[in-house]
Amino acid sequence: MTANEKWKIAILGELKSRSISEWFEKHMTLPCVLLSSMEKKDVTEELMVCPYCFEKTKIEYPTLKKHTVSRTCEHCQKEFENGCVTTDESTKAYFKVGRGYYRDNIIMTRANICGEDGILYIEVESVDLKYNVAKKRVVIKPNIIGYGFAFVGGRYRYMYGKASRARTANYSSYYHPEFFADESVLEFATEKEISNERILSDRNLMHVMYDLEMSAEKISVPGRSILARKARRFMDENPIVDLPIEIFNRHEYLILKLQKIDNLTHRFYYKGYCSSCGARYTHKNSGQMYSENKVHKCPKCGKGTMLFVEHDSNSKDYTVVDVLANKGIVIRRFMCYYDYKKQGIKIEAQEKDRIYINYSDNPEWGFSYIVKEGEDIWKIRKMDDIPYNYLKSHNLIVTERAEEFLKYTGFREFVDAHFRDDEPLHEAMTLKSMFYFLNACSTTTCLEKIAKLGWTKLCASYAEDITRENDIGIEPNARTIHEVLKLPKRLVTYITEHVNQNPYSSDVARIQNFYSIDENVMPEDLDWCAAHNVDAGNLRRIVRLLNISVHQAVEYLERVRVSQCFIPKSAVIEWYDYLNAAENIQADLSDKTVRYPSSLKREHDRASFKYQVIKDKNKEERFRKICKEYGETYSYESEKYQIVAPKDMQDLFEEGRRLNHCVGTYADRIAEGRTCVCFIRKKENPDQPYFTVEIAPDEERVRQIHGLSNRNVDRTRDHELYQFLKKWAKAKQINISAM
């Protein structure tokens, strides 16, 4: 037994001897079981079951503080987590604590392994909680994805789990796992004179934890792991067709080796070899050196598509699309090594991974991603592990068998459209987008029709949604393109000729939304809405309320734009607010002067005011109470500016009137606790409205900030104000990205 195997077995035994579930029982705050929740007069009453003593307990708290209130059992006095499991007493429920809740957890504990004293690192990606109220118990099941040992001193000894080194680096850079250390770790740090801060934050320790790629179950023999056995069984059941090595000899090569440089004349002298004609010659080039992997021609035979400089060997990635023996597609990736020291070119191909896609009637498998991790060792990986490698025409090989098999899927059109000379790199085809397309074609027929239009972006988006089983708003197996997109022929033509020759899914979705509002929508109206950023969702409510066409709505919005200098994007929102208020005060919406007011802003303010007057009489009291509460939370000031809350509804109406925007209609939302509105003032003139800010209290983010006539904050023009708002947001922990 080697030293490495000895360490592996010892660490595995140490891990099995410890109960990770008990550790979580001791350290994790459990969520409760929610039986009922009732809101009365801004107060929420909840009946829940304590996850520790399983006794029923009642809790009352202000509704506005539901995300911050502390929940404690009245029987055992233990605090439980805000996130609740909703169930009845006899039903089992599951609650998953994962990323975004406890994030990735790294448990750290002291261990003595093989006579070495150090720290055992155990990575837990998520925790499954299984409740059984009737039996008064909760089962905690941590999902361990890796484990490792690191001796923290002058040197490191380490072990890894199921994660790769690259994935570990991502944890360090992006995910920032949460470290939990017990008392033994801190004792160890004291003995070794190591900073506690270093132990809890040093990301280098994570890089050494997963250095080797092996199985957790059969750790001494990598090829016998569960994932390896599954991969081998799958590969045996789905045999592939052998590929000749000549398939990778797709280029003629021109090989140049630099011999000398004349610094006076700036000439470069090379010895050359052409793999096509076998010619050997000297060559000189003036001005600059040749660079690798550029297209050049042999001066003797005129052939040669790839230039190699200075080296006796080179390597290149290839992606091969081939047919399976049992009706399916396999995508195989190779690393090819080219050796051209003497005669000809010697090629060696090493396969890296495979993606199997099922085209048969066998429902047991849809696709599988299998990665080679050693000599004759393959392991199954998740779909999300498929890399986003960019593909180019010279490194993609589609066999003749595959071409014939995929003849009526649109695959060739999809590939050719991606490999146009004018296609930018960031829009080039990736390995993953090709996989999505081929996998979607196995169950649907719509992509062929889309691909033949050259709509590669739409193909790629729909293919991914089909694979991930998302709702994409198309008919996957329709016969014609307009039936696929659920649009008439005229609008499909309109998309191609006027929107985008290679549209995105958002382009098509926008047209579909307008068509769902009005089946007779005209292209000129679509153009107008696109030019003025008028969203279909905002227009939909108006069209349905007034029972009019999109064209009629656009005509009025254009008149408002020209005669009232009102931006259509804001006017459509103002118009709906006005119509909603007019309906509530029982105005006659059949009257054209009411439906299409000559002064939208003026009539909007009038209708809004009347609507506010006839509202609940107790609203004013609730309004003042809530404004006072959130005013204490969000108020802020600097030497030049201040943020204050309105004192009463009249303040809100006056703010909307003087700044010529619709904040006066927000009184209901404020009184109900759905939103918060504050005023931004200059300290030198605190009574003069300046800007108005709306805050989403549950999300702690700014929804909008508007000044006179819905003017936004300009970061250049209003630089001082912008800096003030950033400081305010930081102090109050509010997200202002929407500003």
Image: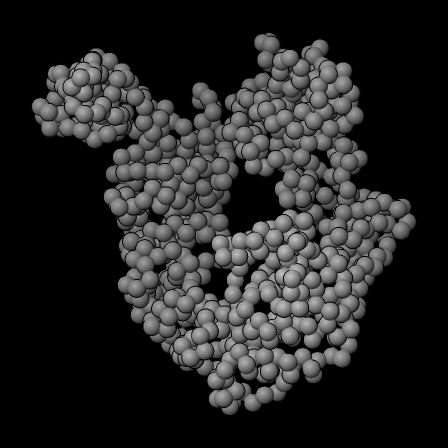
Against 113, is 475 above or below? below
- Percent from the top left, x then y, of residue 155? 62, 13
Task: Tell me if residue 617 comes above or below residue 492 in the rendering.
Answer: below
Question: Is 114 on the left-hand or right-hand side of 485?
Answer: right
Residue 610 in picture, x, y percent from top left:
64, 83
Front residue of 180 and 653: 653
Quarter occupied by residue 143: top right
Residue positioned most to the left = 300
Residue 679 visible in rendering: no
Comparing 261 with 37, the one in front is: 261
> Horizontally, is 452 left or right of 110 in the view?
left
Quadrant of the drawing holding the C terminus: bottom right
For residue 633, say whether it is visible. Answer: yes
579 w.r.t. 689: above or below: below
Q: Nearer the viewer, residue 718 or 386?
A: 718
Residue drawn at 12 percent across, 22 percent down: 277
- The residue positioned 59% from the left and 64% from the top of the image is 691
Q: Give x and y (percent) for residue 29.
A: 77, 42
- Whole-percent x and y of residue 647? 73, 69
Residue lying at 46% horizontally and 73% vertically, measured from the top left: 566
Q: Residue at x 45, y 78 (%)?
A: 564
Q: Is residue 337 left or right of residue 223?
A: left
Where's the N terminus, which quadrant?
A: top right
